[in-house]
Amino acid sequence: RKGGESMARQLKTIRNQIVKNMRNLGVYKKEYKTTIDVFADMVHQYEVFTEEFEKQGHRVQEEYTNKAGATNMRKTPIYSAMEKLRMDISTYSNLLCLNPKALENIKPRETGESKLAEVLSKLE
């Protein structure tokens, strides 16, 4: 890193990589733009938070004094945000078929039809 430059990728770079991955997997549709944009934003936030977490020495817990004056240990706010983002990123990677488990559910069957195509054809 030069002079405090961020290592987090630019939002546009992340979005382009998501679209490229989806195209390579055959699951991209322009109608998914909003979902892709939200996913890209979450990945970007996660990368920025990860850098900050590293700068803070990977502190997972900190002392916290509540309104009643009691001091307890709690997760650091940045660690809590990263945990939530991990769950949301996992959910969106499923929605966009960007992980092996989600992709497995849309692979063509022996008949050559995907599960979705098979279900839709039965509705006709």
Image: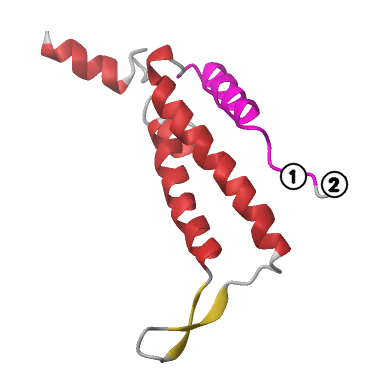
Residue appearing at x 66%, y 68% in the figure: 58
Q: Secondary structure at mark 1?
A: loop
Q: Nearer the viewer, residue 63 or 85?
A: 63
Residue 107, can we see it?
A: no
Q: Earlier in the sequence, mark 2 or mark 1?
A: 2
Q: Amino acid at mark 2?
A: Arg
Residue 32, image quadrant: top left
Residue appearing at x 46%, y 37% in the figure: 93
Q: Is residue 31 left or right of residue 19?
A: left
Q: Secondary structure at mark 2?
A: loop
Q: Is residue 102 left or right of residue 56?
A: left
Residue 54 against residue 104 in the figure, above or below: below
- Write down the region rendered in magenta: 5-27
Residue 104 against residue 115 in the figure, above or below: below
Residue 6's disc is 1
In this figure, which residue is indicated by the disc labeled 2? Answer: 1
Q: Is residue 90 magenta?
A: no
Asked whether disc 2 touches disc 1, contact meaning CB atoms under 8 Å apart, the reply is: yes
Q: In the orientation shown, which residue stands out farthest toward the top?
A: 124
Q: Quadrant of the C terminus?
A: top left
Residue appearing at x 70%, y 61% in the figure: 54
Whole-percent x and y of residue 83?
48, 58
Q: In the orientation shown, which residue stands out farthest toward the left?
A: 124
Q: CA distance from mark 2 to mark 1?
A: 7 Å
Residue 51 against residue 33 in the figure, above or below: below
Q: Are there few (<14), some (14-19), or many (20+) residues within 10 Å of tag 1?
A: few
Q: Amino acid at mark 1?
A: Ser
Q: Is residue 87 left or right of residue 5?
A: left
